[in-house]
Amino acid sequence: MRQLLKKLAALIITLFIVSLLAFLAFQIIPEDPVTHLLGTEATPEAAAELRAQLGLDRPVLVRYFSWLAGVLRGDFGESYSYHMPVADMLSDKLPLTALLTGLSFLFTVLLSIPLGVLAGSVRSRFLDNLFAALDQMVMSVPPFFIGMLVCWLFGLVLRLFTPGAYVSYQDSWSGCIAYLIFPALSIALPRVAMTVKLLRGAIRHEMEQDYIRTSRSRGAGRAWLLFRHALPNALIPVITFMAVSLAEIMTASIVIEQVFTVPGVGRLLLASISNGDFPVVQAIVLILAAWIVLINFAADLLNGLADPRVRLG
Amino acid sequence: MKKKTTRKKGNSFLYTGAVLSGLMLFLILLGCFWTPYSPTAMDAAAKFQAPSWAHLLGTDNFGRDIFSRVLQGADASFLIALCVVGISCTLGVLIGGLCGYYGGLADLALTRLCDSITAFPAILLALVIVSLTGRGKYNVIFALSILFIPSFARVVRSEFARCRELNYVKSARLMGVSDGRILFRHILPNTFPVLLPAVTIGFNNAILSEASMSFLGIGVQPTEASLGLMLSDSQTYLQSAPWYALCTGGAVVLLILGFSLLSEGLQRRNGG
Amino acid sequence: MKYRILAVFLAAAVLMCSLCGCGGATSETPAPSDEIAPSSPAAPVNEITVGIAQDLDDSLDPYQMTAAGTREVMFNVFEGLVKPDSDGNFVCAVASDYSISDDGLTYTFPLREGVVFHNGAACTADDVLYSFETCAATSVTSALVEALSAAQVTAEGNTVTVALDAPNPDFLSYVASVYIVPKDYAEQATQPVGTGPFKYVSRSVQENVILEKNGDYYGTPASLDRVTYRIFEDNNALFTALNGGALDLVTHLTIDQVNNLTNGYTVLEGTMNLVQAMYLNNAVKPFDDQRVRQALCYAVDVPAMMELTAAGHGVRVGSSMYPAFAKYFDASLADAYPHDVEKAKALLAEAGYAGGFSFTIIAPSNYTPHVDTATVLAEQLKEVGVTAEVQLVDWNTWVSDVYGNRNFEATVCGFDASSLTASAMLARWVSDNGKNMINYNDPDYDAAYAAAQDPSLSEAEQTEQYMRCLEILSETAANVYTQDLADFVAINPALEGFTFYPLYVIDMACLHFAG
């Protein structure tokens, strides 16, 4: 319990530091958002007025705390470009990215566990090597190139979907999911390869343990040993790894959204960076960072729950 | 029996990786001195040609030879990765070594810092850094070098911390050998078995990150060939000139695959 | 993204005047046929989907919009007292008529009866006064603010009168830019309300903007019931969606895209109405030397560049004027500097750069044609020993660094006219002009430009002075002039009535399904 409280305190401090960094990082940018907002033909008076209106003339720390106070109330400020509350923009985009992340995670789990078990249990040297080689191959493909390959193969050659013809989830959930299958697959593939590799190693490791050998010498079936004994133990590191994957999937979507033109958080982030739309960038960086911190926190707890050795330690 | 199999498997990864990396290194070296065409020469009459004997990998939207550009792009990626790994490995070894050997409060703080940096995906941090420093080759090297320090520091730190307690180090200290000598002559060589896989992995990550950044348009700038940039351009012509994307992407994959097989083989040989 | 801001100066605002005829030549080429039919044929659903490559990441307030892409869409929602037609003339909109006094000082606009805002309120003289006041006070376009500051607007009954301090031949174009909005309506930035043939329904960031037919429109109502602008922010994705048949209309396509279009869209060709050039900073070495600038003009092979980047489409220009300005455009200037490597080398040697030199070309990354042109020019310059490096910058950085601080050596971009007047193209190169980005400084030019401003000149004499300005720009090689870019439009063959404007707008009201 004490341990948990300590971890919680550390979590809150980390979140605070993350928010400070997310805010400060975008205060040292040399670019002036006002030039962007008003275009090239603005009068200096209008520029000065806008600067005051946006509060850009106040000291940095004052701005930070007023921003943080807003964030805690769910108010992320107003976008420089769209003149809309950032929270409204995000509430449109977050469900989409969450859906994409969820789908990718689902694919990762559904594909990697059976494949990992298979890779861990095949006895033929040839098949084992084949699995390992395939694994290495998939892990060597840059995520965006996987996206392009998926676009090309499923979209342009097989015509299973039209790249770019994204269907908004507000219009049709099924249409949206049907489109997101392909980007989700692109995000999942490298994760699947990594998880399979991990699971394969863990299963092999367990199967060589003394307790398994003893059971086998007593006449226990291989399959029974695998599923009853080796797999549950082998899954412990995999579960932690998968939890951490959730964080990486979210960031992988930044790149993949770009390839498949899914208008999610990632695209908004990239566009806002080039627009100098700091309130939006700050909000997204903060949300992504907080997500990663929370996921790592959860993975840590999960690890403790799943493995009694860690819990004691 | 069992032992024999594992060793053999590890070596087959090592061999394949070595051969593939060797081949890629040869092509990269070749690209430094010779390309079949000038990588920037444009030819309106030869736009979008499919691969042929004249143009091994076809031509792009300006009629430039893709094979020559891939050679040059691989060169650029390789050099960037080399710089990144060189800088971050040196700094990582220094920081990790000192922290591991001396321990104390600085060690604790730096370890926490490294842990928190590694918790964030490289691409997100690189985006933030580049949005602060601007685009371009040198900024990419700068951003990635910073981001990769922790991965080296981590590995080296634990190794130094372990060695500190070993008898030969203790006795060296008792014999009055200077700290610097102990650090660099006695302990450092012992970290090579773990450092080497870390270097190959770091190398791969550097190539991958550079390609991703250039793909997103925040890395290497046009007129300079870069594999990521070429892939980004080729996306427009995925339907009409698929060889552009496929060949360029294939080159990136081979480059990374060679080194990842190498690092996998190294790890397996170490008994990982 | 890439087309987010079209011609680089589109941020400039007032887009019109009556001087010249229609924009570039229009020709029709059918795209190679079939496979997939465009999505909505002459179906009972009378609505279309338009693909746009840039988001409206902007305020929608008529006086705050800066991006060309936003203006292009909102042209269908807002109207001034007068509005431009496709020939560049002004026709009555919220006003039913207009008259100008002989001394050019008084403009009279009787208001049209029965004009209703999209929110249901009737449009009155009060709203017009409010619009003029708000525009003068808040507009982000300094030229417009300046023009309005010299005007007194009064209303009497249903007639609005504008009195000017001095005659301003371009004033009607400014009137057209003062969009009429309802008085004391505070949500223009997010829920704009105007009087145009379409009303604004909604927008979803980075996804779409939806307009609906204004049933109460005073003029001929639009034929289409609903127009959905789908935002791609990425030319590749936009093209893939177009090729997949998901869109009915896409403008600003490149020739490569047109050639790769595989389903039966009709393709129309026009020009972008801008002057693309490699603009040189005349104040930095070595570009302060006229011979070096001329050498660069000889060194580049513009037709070859156009062949590479646009298969030869587009119109070659040789000075700061594009062909839509038929009155001033002098096609012969385009040939002033034929491709001549020897001459270029000789000029460089004469200027003391026999061994060549190196410099950086900056291009706005969001605009592919400029980037492509810069890439090809840099390659061509190698032939004379000049090393040019291309550097891409965000639009934002371009505006503040290159345009604002003039911190550049060379940049490839396009300038268009903020109004269809010669001065809109030429005033900026006067040596003390605040927008003289290239620090051009030529006494002859200043004199010729000043002479053209003399109100006592006849039209022909004035034109002659402006032509002289253009010649001087060419003679002194102020910039390496390249082209007016080709502009391709792909359209569902069932749709009729697409009209090119000499401005950066797409008029949805003239589109209708055949039959």
Image: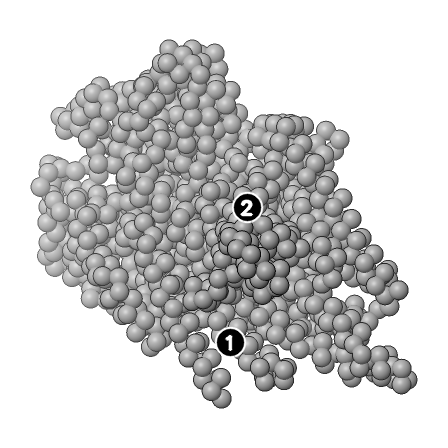
Q: Residue furthest front?
A: B175
Q: Is residue C251 above or below residue B9?
A: above
Name the residue that disc number 1 marks. Answer: A297
> Which residue is nearer to you in this view: C399 or C310?
C399
Horizontal and vertical percent for residue C169?
19, 36
Looking at the image, which residue is at 49% across and 57% down?
B98
Q: Is C27 on the left or on the right of A118, as rendered?
A: left
Horizontal and vertical percent for residue A294?
49, 74
Q: Chain of mark 1?
A: A
Q: Is C423 on the left or on the right of B254, as rendered?
A: left
Residue type beneath disc 1? Phe
Which corner quadrant of the image does residue C336 belong to?
A: top left
User: SS at mark 1?
Assistant: helix
Which colour scheme appears in the figure? one colour
Classify the position of the C terminus of chain A by image quarter.
bottom right
The image's mark for residue A204 is none
Q: Residue furthest bottom?
A: A1
Q: Chain of mark 2?
A: B
Horizontal and vertical percent for residue C110?
18, 53
User: SS at mark 2?
Assistant: helix
State whether residue A59 appears in this view. Answer: yes
Name the residue that disc number 2 marks. Answer: B86
> Which residue is nearer to you in this view: C316 or A106?
A106
Looking at the image, which residue is at 24% across and 50% down?
C140
